[in-house]
Image (cartoon, rainbow, N blue to C red):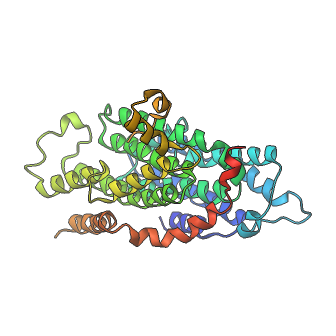
Amino acid sequence: MLAMYSGQIGSFSSRDLLLFFIMWELELIPVYLLLSMWGGKKRLYSATKFILYTAGGSVFLLLGVLGIGLYGSNEPILNFETSANQSYPVALEIIFYIGFFLAFAVKSPIIPLHTWLPDTHGEAHYSTCMLLAGILLKMGAYGLVRINMELLPHAHSIFSPWLVIVGTMQIIYAASTSSGQRNLKKRIAYSSVSHMGFIIIGIGSITDTGLNGAVLQIISHGFLGAALFFLAGTTYDRIRLVYLDEMGGIAIPMPKIFTMFSIFSMASLALPGMSGFVSELIVFFGIITSQKYLLMPKIFNYFCNGNWNDINSYLFIIYVTPDLFVLISIFLPVIGIGIYPDFVLSLSVDKVEAILSNFFIDSFHE
């Protein structure tokens, strides 16, 4: 776990593309070992599927890093700040963008490259599930913001409408699939895929509000996903059941776990006053106020004039024991962010404005 933490922290803190790639790959090995050594009966299958998907995506990441580093210079330029000021031909920038997107789409995950996640969560030990949901998935979203959005702004402005569409499809598809799962951990896993769709929409909105909402959703879902998997694991430790149709009546023998499960489920459902509600609401306002999509004027036009045709094509936007100590430690920031989201937004607003300064709204209409 310490080796995995090292790779994850290195990925988030690296200021060099090559170091980012090395740290990105470093965390794969300990995750594979955690999956293959501890888990359910099909843990080797899920671990192999995980490593094949992520290693395959890493090939595109390596090609993109080498392409950016070697373009237009005899010496490799891999520094993030230097690369952010580099301009590329549009066709080449699109190729770079697609390569990086495929790598990050596997890790996020984004449909249809998400199929490794339910199998992995279904077989992994709950402590590994907490790390996967809380940190690992967020590496893909971080890569989309740090590289695709910041280093390749023109290509991002071209692909951003598709990101919004894919994010919306992901929310609907994963949420619908989640409700049909018998395995509790797989149900939570599909819920995580659905929530990542809000992050994709926020990134595709190209607005301060939308991107800040995506960052807030990254943090919020990190807490909520980890808490739900922890509760699923502690429940399994006590009753040795993981299928929902066999778990009826656990509220009586385990009232504290039932209460916390209900609270975090409501938070994941975006109950007002919780972090999930604030982050998803900010993403929603970001997309409807985006000058790129002009949804707000069309919404006002629809409500004021009743002209259905003006808005019909835009309706794709859907809207104290050790166990208790851990749960309360996760619950406090969930409530804190829900009540006072500016605590987190104040940390990201300057960087968000710096990233969006590369985008020129006038160029979107060309």
Residue 76 drawn above or below residue 100? below
Number of numbered discs visible in the structure rendering = 0
Could you say where residue 146 lies in the image, as x and y percent from the top left? 62, 60
Give the residue at x 48% y 35%.
314
Q: Nearer the viewer, residue 217 or 250?
A: 217
Could you say where residue 295 lies in the image, as x and y percent from the top left? 49, 42
Could you say where residue 144 lies in the image, as x and y percent from the top left? 60, 53
Give the residue at x 56% y 58%.
142
Q: Nearer the viewer, residue 337 or 61?
A: 337
Residue 175 drawn above or below residue 121? above
Location of residue 113 (image quadrant): top right
- Which quarter shows the C terminus? top right
Q: Residue furthest left?
A: 252
Q: Residue furthest top?
A: 309
Q: Residue furthest right?
A: 74
Q: Is residue 123 visible?
A: no
Q: Is residue 68 visible?
A: yes
- Horizontally, residue 257 falls left or right of residue 46, namely left
Give the residue at x 24% y 67%.
328
Could you say where residue 31 lies in the image, as x and y percent from the top left? 51, 55
Give the residue at x 49% y 68%.
2
